[in-house]
Amino acid sequence: MQLTETETSWQKIVRDFAQKKLKPGTYWLEGEEFWENARMLAEHGFLGVTLPEEYGGMNLSLLDALLIIEELCRVCPTSGRLVYHTSIGIANFINHLGTEEQKKKYLPRIISGELFVALGMSEPEAGSATTDLTTTATDAGDYYKLNGSKIFISEAHLADLFVVYVRFGNTGRASDIGAILVERNTPGFTVGVNEENMSGEIQCALYFDDALVPKENLLIERDAFKALMGVYNGVRLGYAAQTLGITQAAFDRTVQYVQERKQFGKEICEFQGVQWMIADMYMQLEAARTLLYRAAQAAANNKPDKNAVSIAKVYVAEAAKKITDDCLQLHGGYGFSKQYPLEWYYRCVRAASIAGGTLQVHKTMMAASVLGRKFDQRK
Ligand SMILES: Cc1cc2nc3c(=O)[nH]c(=O)nc-3n(C[C@H](O)[C@H](O)[C@H](O)COP(=O)(O)OP(=O)(O)OC[C@H]3O[C@@H](n4cnc5c(N)ncnc54)[C@H](O)[C@@H]3O)c2cc1C
């Protein structure tokens, strides 16, 4: 797929910015390193790039945002993730579904890097089966009273605001599900302890125990599932862009390494077996990129290509596992060592097969579409 001149210029601008201004990271940055890069991104306008200009954003397209995330992740995955969260990730729920008051209240602070937002969707008993969620929001005068819990919430340790999927009715159907904005200091709401996942990323549980949320924080009520999933598809593509950028970083290092490392008296890139691995990885990266950009374009043009997101998501996740594994392999014992970043890249991209819907769930949706049949998962 051919990128436009503007799109390729974004890639160059971001590559240059990332190399010159950001603290590089081959692990998730924390503490002062994290804030240093967050400040730098905010100062240069990279937080909330797709959000409207009237709130301080740049109103960039989904594809522009994916290109920026991918480029940043090649140098600093934490920075790419920050742009993903503030641009096409969680902040977009407010941008697309929020009231004017909510947008005015929250979007400028997200763009300036003052406010972080997390998504509370998954529950201990409702993962792939999102519509089984049981966290309830009941009417309590000027408030909604929330009860229930969430699990695996990324960035919850940093977030001041949470987009929370809740059930407003008790029919047990998906039509009861909507979403509400919960501020961190809400009475009855607690963020659980920091739990480190396989890549070292922090995730937390969320607990709602008669948590009182003002009614003006309602984001979308009932019959909202389709609208929520529409925004969530952007989140999925953002996650894929992040995964692709991290995979490209592993590949970049490997291309350099095979031309430096010598065995049997010559650079290992001179062995045909190594060359074929490089060519395979290169092909998979190009294919993954094409599918991702195609999905972004389809979404931007409102084309009803409902499989494009699943195809991109699944392909990127599978290619990322294979490529980072081969990159690690080509580094030999150094690849397996914690002294080098290959094993981190390998652990990092593994999440893409689970977060944003597991590969199996996306394949089930694609198969149903190809076969023209609906397969009831409950029978
Ligand atoms: C790194 C990471 C970050 C995350 N961040 C967030 C976040 O910020 N906010 C949030 O709300 N959630 C988040 N999640 C949770 C994520 O959305 C869930 O883990 C995911 O939806 C899968 O749910 P589960 O873990 O309960 O697995 P389950 O749904 O229990 O699945 C277990 C296994 O069964 C398979 N399976 C289930 N149903 C079917 C089916 N119908 N057909 C075939 N196979 C099936 C799955 O593919 C999987 O292999 C994150 C997860 C990860 C790994």
Image: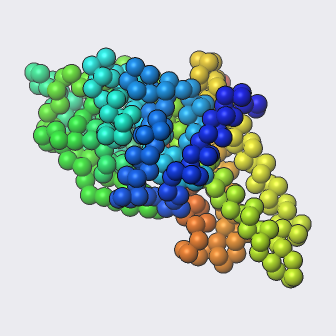
Q: Between residues 178 and 90, which one lies in front from this camera angle?
A: 90
At x 19%, y 35%, the residue is: 146
The answer to whether residue 9 shows anywhere in this view is yes
Q: State the residue lying farthest toward the bottom.
A: 264
Tell me if 365 is positioned left or right of 49 in this view: right
Scheme of image coloration: rainbow
At x 53%, y 38%, the residue is: 238
Q: Is residue 196 above or below residue 140?
A: below
At x 10%, y 21%, the residue is: 141
Q: Position of residue 272 (x, y in %)?
A: 89, 66
Q: Position of residue 33 (x, y in %)?
A: 41, 58
Q: Is residue 49 above or below residue 250?
A: above
**Which quadrant would the N terminus be assigned to in this image?**
top right
Q: State the residue lying farthest toward the left.
A: 141
The answer to whether residue 309 shows anywhere in this view is no
At x 35%, y 28%, the residue is: 107
Q: Is residue 152 above or below residue 232?
A: below
Q: Between residues 292 and 339, which one lies in front from this camera angle?
A: 339
Tell me if 356 is positioned left or right of 244 in this view: left
Quadrant of res 165: top left
Tell me if 285 is positioned left or right of 265 in this view: left
Q: Position of residue 148 (x, y in %)?
A: 23, 41
Quadrant of res 140: top left
